Image (cartoon, rainbow, N blue to C red):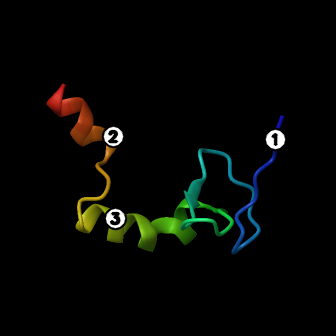
Amino acid sequence: MRIIKCDLCKKIIKDEPITAGVGFFPNVELCEKCGSSILKFLKKHKFIESKNTKNKQN
């Protein structure tokens, strides 16, 4: 079993972590609280869709 901690607040992540990285730079794993601003930006600019939106389209 792999224990994942948020790279910013060091809290143990129980659900899936938010993984962020660019190019060859190392990835970081964030909890939902610390990664919320990243998710908000990506959704605003339509780089990602929420799971609920995908389910409605199918």
- Label ID, residue 51: 2
Which callout, 1 or 2, points at the residue further toward the start of the chain? Answer: 1
Secondary structure, mark 2, is helix
Which badge, 2 or 3, is on the more N-terminal residue?
3
Residue 48: percent from left, percent from top: 32, 53
Q: Are marks 1 and 2 in contact (CB under 8 Å)?
A: no
Residue on which the image places disc 3? 42
In the rendered image, which quarter is residue 54 located in? top left
Q: Which mark is residue 18?
A: none
Residue at screen point 33% across, 40% down: 51
Q: Quadrant of the N terminus?
A: top right
The answer for how far apart the CA atoms under marks 3 and 1 are is 27 Å
Total marks shown come to: 3
Q: Position of residue 42 (x, y in %)?
A: 34, 65
For badge 1, the amino acid type reads Arg
Q: Residue furthest front?
A: 24
